[in-house]
Amino acid sequence: MISIKSAKNLFSISALGPILLVKIEETIDDEGIKNLTETLSESIVKYKSKAVIIDLANVDILDSYLASHLESLAYTTKLLQAEVIISGLKGPTIITLLEFDIKIEGVNFALDVNHALDQLS
């Protein structure tokens, strides 16, 4: 397993064979989102990843910035031909997505990382 952590521990990316697991911390900032997008894109190409699980278990409330960039992150991942599953959504996080009318087309959702891995097998 290969693991990449951001400088400020705002996110981590772990390679599990052809699957990348992205864990995002609630404290991620603008620079962290930009760094995550670049690092994830490079990792998908480098590891020839077929799927990405974006785990939001550590995020209780999404602000508008993170919510909109989550959509862009998923779209970027799909452009690189990797399936996207978002896991770990909690009640407040779901409410934020609905309030900001964020619709992430073609992305699957899972209760947690284990359910996401089940969807991919």
Image (cartoon, rainbow, N blue to C red):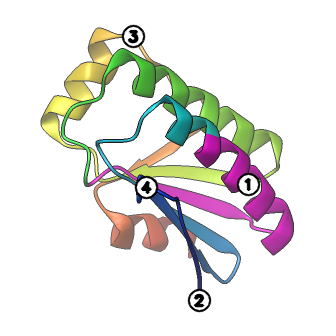
Q: CA distance from mark 2 to mark 1?
A: 19 Å
Label 2 secondary element: loop
Circles 3 and 1 in contact, beta carbons < 8 Å:
no
Which residues fall within the magenta stretch?
A: 35-57
Query: Who is closer to the viewer here, 29 or 48?
Result: 29
Is the N terminus in the top left, top right, bottom left or bottom right quadrant?
bottom right
| Mark identifier at residue 1 | 2
Label 1 secondary element: loop
Residue wearing tag 4: 8
Q: Residue furthest front?
A: 7
Query: Residue 107 occupies which quadrant of the picture?
Result: top right
Q: CA distance from mark 4 to mark 3?
A: 30 Å
Q: CA distance from mark 4 to mark 2?
A: 21 Å
Query: Residue 33 occupies which quadrant of the picture?
Result: top right
Frontmost of labels 4 and 2 is: 4
Q: CA distance from mark 3 to mark 2?
A: 36 Å
Q: Amino acid at mark 2?
A: Met
